[in-house]
């Protein structure tokens, strides 16, 4: 299952970011978070509601919307299956939720109190970017990547399959090309460097890491150390990366989108199904799509946000982009498994001039009956209504 997975600290000051993590809706709003009464919350506050299992709300007090139990202004958020990470303005990293695989980064393994508040992650105090997989995490500090949590598919990038309850350096990344962004799928990891190079490691059953030849096999099923992703165009400089459950996405400086990995639902934008380990552009009539500013991946979908604010999605059987009708230009998009959220600058009606959060996807995941996929967006606020 895909989920909202990563954020860069440098994104937060000029964007309102909305992430729904399984049954938890959390809003990071540098200016304000709308409530049904139209009031505003404190700047940078995280609001959560939904299932209280595994401490995923980060607070006591039941499932109704309320601030997560830690003070301060937060500037980045990422979430896994049942755990969450948040970067505070001072660069410290905080975690809460499930800890069976050491996801909380406190050196322990096993469940904590279900109403336990967020706590600092050990040894990290100047975090620049974060990402969360299903049960593992990545953080960038001073251009280097730290990883911790589950490692059964080599997703920690340490040449082993041993899990870790503490952040430790990822081995084999270039020392002379600092990492500026990370992304995580269910059990694979990506890193983007200053020079626009992409590195990948972890689960590779669907080719989401890359070709990585092995004698008698088209590609290795798991990769325990970082390998550089190669592109057919050697001049590619990547400016944004994302990961779905079992596929990977890169946006280059020309606004083209490159995808590789699982394509069972045509989420790569290709008609051929199955594993596709070689990166290729998403095309229209044989020509690469351009003008893409951001992309994100879910369980079986890929969502694209264009420079002009248009949003389109691929997958769930469609290899061609399907435009999502929004009431204004989108300023960010987040895939969260079976549904998608976008922040939108409203241009029409009573909400003109307001930045709102819209959600669409599998009906059950957005609060409706059935399991069909809908591209009709529903406006949300901090109460989830």
Image: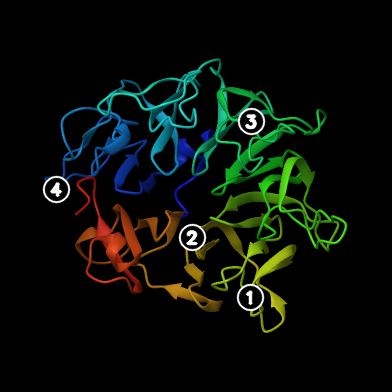
The residue carrying pointer 2 sits among few (fewer than 14), some (14 to 19) or many (20 or more) residues within 10 Å by Cα, namely many
The quadrant in which the C terminus is found is bottom left
- Image position of 242 with respect to 31: above or below: below
Q: Quadrant of residue 371?
A: bottom left
Q: Position of residue 308 (x, y in %)?
A: 51, 64
State the image quarter where residue 225 is shown.
top right
Nearer mark to the viewer, of 4 and 1? 1
* Label 3 with label 1: CB-CB less than 8 Å: no
Dot 3 or dot 4, earlier in sequence = 4
Q: Position of residue 132 (x, y in %)?
A: 51, 39
Q: Secondary structure at mark 4?
A: loop
Rounded to the nearest angstrom, the CA distance separating label 4 from label 1 is: 44 Å
CA gap between label 1 and label 2 equals 15 Å
Camera-near label (2 vs 3) is: 3
Who is closer to the viewer here, 51 or 70? 51
Q: Nearer the viewer, residue 289 or 63?
A: 63
Label 3 SS: loop
- Separation (CA) of disc 3 from disc 4: 47 Å
Sort mark 4 into few (<14), some (14-19) or many (20+) by Cα contacts within 10 Å: few
Would you name the residue on which mark 4 appears? 36
Pointer 3 residue: 162
Q: Residues within 10 Å of mark 3 (few under 14, many from 20)?
A: some
Q: Residue 56: in sight, yes or no?
A: no
Which residue occupies 26% across, 72% down? 370
Q: Which numbered dot is residue 310?
A: none
Mark 1–mark 2 CB contact (< 8 Å): no
Q: Secondary structure at mark 1?
A: loop
> Which residue is disc 1 drawn over?
273
Q: For the residues labelled 4 and 1, say whether their Cβ atoms are less than 8 Å apart.
A: no
Element carrying mark 2: loop
Residue designated by label 2: 299
Question: Quick check: 218 left or right of 100?
Answer: right
């Amino acid at each position: 299952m895909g989920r909202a997975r990563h954020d860069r600290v440098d994104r937060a000051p000029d964007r309102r970011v909305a992430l729904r993590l399984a049954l938890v809706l959390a809003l990071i709003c540098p200016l304000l978070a709308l409530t049904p009464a139209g009031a505003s919350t404190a700047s940078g506050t995280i609001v959560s509601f939904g299932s209280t299992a595994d401490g995923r709300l980060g607070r006591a007090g039941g499932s109704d919307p309320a601030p997560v139990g830690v003070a301060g202004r937060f500037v980045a958020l990422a979430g896994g299956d049942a755990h969450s990470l948040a970067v505070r303005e001072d660069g410290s990293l905080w975690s809460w939720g499930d800890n069976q695989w050491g996801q909380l980064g406190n050196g322990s393994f096993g469940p904590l109190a279900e109403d336990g508040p967020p706590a600092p992650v050990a040894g990290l105090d100047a975090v620049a970017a974060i990402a969360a997989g299903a049960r593992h995490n990545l953080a960038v500090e001073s251009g280097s990547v730290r990883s911790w949590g589950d490692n059964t598919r080599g997703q920690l990038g340490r040449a082993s399959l041993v899990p870790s309850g503490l952040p430790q350096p990822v081995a084999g990344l270039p020392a002379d090309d600092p990492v500026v962004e990370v992304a995580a799928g269910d059990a694979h990891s990506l890193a983007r460097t200053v020079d626009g190079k992409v590195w990948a490691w972890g689960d590779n059953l669907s080719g989401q890491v890359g070709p990585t030849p092995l004698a008698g096999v088209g590609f290795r099923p798991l990769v325990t150390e970082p390998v550089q992703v190669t592109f057919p165009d050697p001049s590619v400089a990547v400016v944004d990366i994302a990961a779905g459950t079992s596929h990977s996405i890169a946006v280059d400086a020309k606004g083209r989108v490159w995808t590789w990995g699982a394509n069972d639902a045509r989420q790569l934008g290709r008609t051929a199904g199955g594993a596709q380990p070689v990166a290729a552009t998403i095309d229209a009539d044989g020509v690469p799509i351009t003008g893409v500013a951001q992309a994100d991946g879910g369980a079986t979908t890929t969502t694209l946000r264009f420079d002009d604010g248009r949003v389109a999605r691929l997958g769930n059987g469609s290899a061609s982009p399907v435009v999502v009708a929004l009431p204004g230009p989108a300023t960010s998009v987040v895939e969260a498994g079976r549904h998608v959220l976008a922040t939108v600058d409203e241009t029409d009606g009573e909400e003109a001039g307001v930045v709102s959060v819209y959600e669409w996807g599998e009906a059950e995941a957005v609060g409706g009956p059935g399991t069909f996929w809908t591209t009709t967006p529903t406006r949300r606020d901090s109460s989830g209504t």
